[in-house]
Amino acid sequence: MVPVTVPAAGTNQEPQGLNLIHTLGCKGCHIIQGDGSALGPDLTQIGSRMTAARIQALLIAPASIREKYMPDYKSVNTEDLEIISNYLYQLR
């Protein structure tokens, strides 16, 4: 598992995280803060259920959570995966 660095308090990765989520098409299957599709789980409060490290691991290997239809994001660079994971983790 790739270690994930959680940003210091007051660090806001929301614009970058939302931009990456939009670019990767995550809302085509997931609702995030009331926006998106309900094909997959609602991610609005995922940070209350998983750590940032767990979120990142699932982005790389979604089969580990029985998500047959979710693509893996192995080709996304580590920095972007951390930004997405940290943003989603902040959703509580």
Image: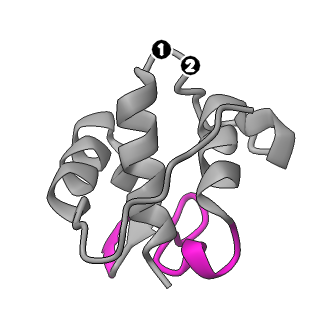
Q: Amino acid at mark 1?
A: Ser
What separation in Å lies between label 2 and label 1 (alpha carbons)? Answer: 4 Å
Where's the N terminus, which quadrant?
top right
* Label 2 Cα crowd, 10 Å radius (few <14 / some 14-19 / many 20+): few
35 on left or right of 31: left
Residue at 45% x, 26% y is: 78
For residue 50, side relative to residue 45 (left or right): right
Q: Which residue is mark 2?
A: 74
Is residue 64 in view from this perspective?
yes
- Percent position (x, y) of residue 53? 65, 50
Contact check, label 2 and label 1, Cβ < 8 Å: yes
- Residue in the image at 23% along x and 47% along y: 22
Residue that sits furthest to the front in the current view: 8
How many tags in the picture? 2
> In the depicted view, which residue is nearer to us: 38 or 41?
41
Q: Is residue 20 above or below residue 31?
A: above
One can see residue 29 in this view: no
To which quarter of the image does residue 4 belong? top right
From the viewer's perspective, is 12 left or right of 8? left
Q: Which residues are magenta?
A: 34-50
Residue 11: x and y in percent read: 25, 67
* Residue in the picture at 58% in, 72% down: 46
Q: Is residue 40 magenta?
A: yes
Secondary structure beneath dot 2 equals loop
* Residue at (50, 85) in percent of width and height: 92
Q: Sort mark 1 into few (<14), some (14-19) or many (20+) by Cα contacts within 10 Å.
A: few
Q: Position of residue 51 (x, y in %)?
A: 66, 64
Magenta stretch: helix, strand or loop mostly? loop
Report the residue marked by disc 1. 75
Give how far across and how far down residue 62 sits, in percent.
Answer: 71, 38
Kind of residue indicated by mark 2:
Lys
Helix, strand or loop at label 1? It is: loop
